[in-house]
Image: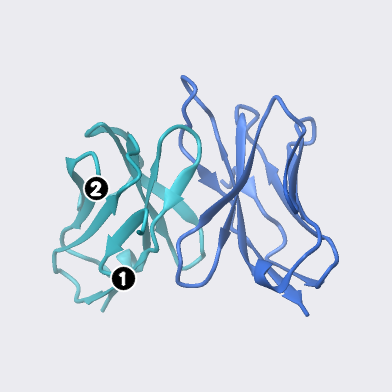
Amino acid sequence: DTAVSQTPKYLVTQMGNDKSIKCEQNLGHDTMYWYKQDSKKFLKIMFSYNNKELIINETVPNRFSPKSPDKAHLNLHINSLELGDSAVYFCASSHRNEQYFGPGTRLTVT
Amino acid sequence: DQQVKQNSPSLSVQEGRISILNCDYTNSMFDYFLWYKKYPAEGPTFLISISSIKDKNEDGRFTVFLNKSAKHLSLHIVPSQPGDSAVYFCAASIRTGGSQGNLIFGKGTKLSVKP
């Protein structure tokens, strides 16, 4: 009974491709997030969604777009992938204070 | 510009002894602080948190201390166990309307507890 799940766990693709990472939470939380952990190990927020409304959008390229079909899902679409997009992407959800993270998706762009 | 800093990339402690992980922050508007633990190939797991109105919060073997004047917090683990070996992330946020705002993470400290 995974609380926050992500698919796929690993994703290897070539530059220029378009890919998606899926996230689902079964905690009934109101807010979901996407984080990027780069090669320097910094965890930085990319987006958050609250009740299907985008409430935080950090300075990420517009090649990245979050899509939330419902409250339990927040998918991340990435267009025209670049080498610098290689990182681990974490989905998270929260109700009020603590955030709960998924296992991460390691994206490698070749 | 790092608003949350964990200056020790690694820490090694003997089993049974105390582990002390440190975290400094620069933004005085932060009012909520959290510690997360991360094992390899897994997502961060929430460990313990503290509001800025407190200076200490304890949960079992884990205690977080907050020194607002020094903009410093620490996580104490007593006694340390080999299963505590992981990367520990400090995070801070500014809460609005009672809900957590954007989490700003430190770079993490890798704790190794030796049997």
Q: Residues within 10 Å of mark 2 (few under 14, many from 20)?
A: many
- Asked whether, in this view, residue B8 is left or right of residue B37, the answer is right
Label 2 is found on which chain of the structure? A
Q: What element carries label 2?
A: strand
Where residue B111 sits, quadrant-wise, is bottom right
- Asked whether, in this view, residue B107 is left or right of residue B72, the answer is left
| Residue A74, disc | 2
- Amino acid type indicated by mark 2: Leu
- Asked whether, in this view, residue B25 is left or right of residue A82, the answer is right
B17 above or below A47?
A: below
Going 51% across and 65% down the picture, which residue do you hit? A40
A47 above or below B113?
A: above
Q: Quadrant of the C terminus of chain A?
A: bottom left
Q: How crowded is mark 1: few (under 14 residues within 10 Å), some or many (20 or more)?
A: some
> Could you tell me how far apart the alpha carbons at marks 2 and 1 are, in whole angstroms?
16 Å
> Mark 2 vs mark 1: which is more N-terminal?
1
Q: Quadrant of the N terminus of chain A?
A: bottom left
Residue annotated with mark 1:
A9
Going 46% across and 67% down the picture, which residue do you hit? B42
Q: Residue A108 in the image: x percent, y percent?
A: 30, 74
Q: Residue A39 in the image: x percent, y percent?
A: 46, 68
The chain coloured cyan is: A
Going 65% across and 29% down the picture, which residue do you hit? B28
Q: Chain B is drawn in which colour?
A: blue
Q: Are marks 2 and 1 on the same chain?
A: yes
A76 and B27: which one is in front? A76
Which residue reaches farthest top? B97
A3 and A11: which one is in front? A3
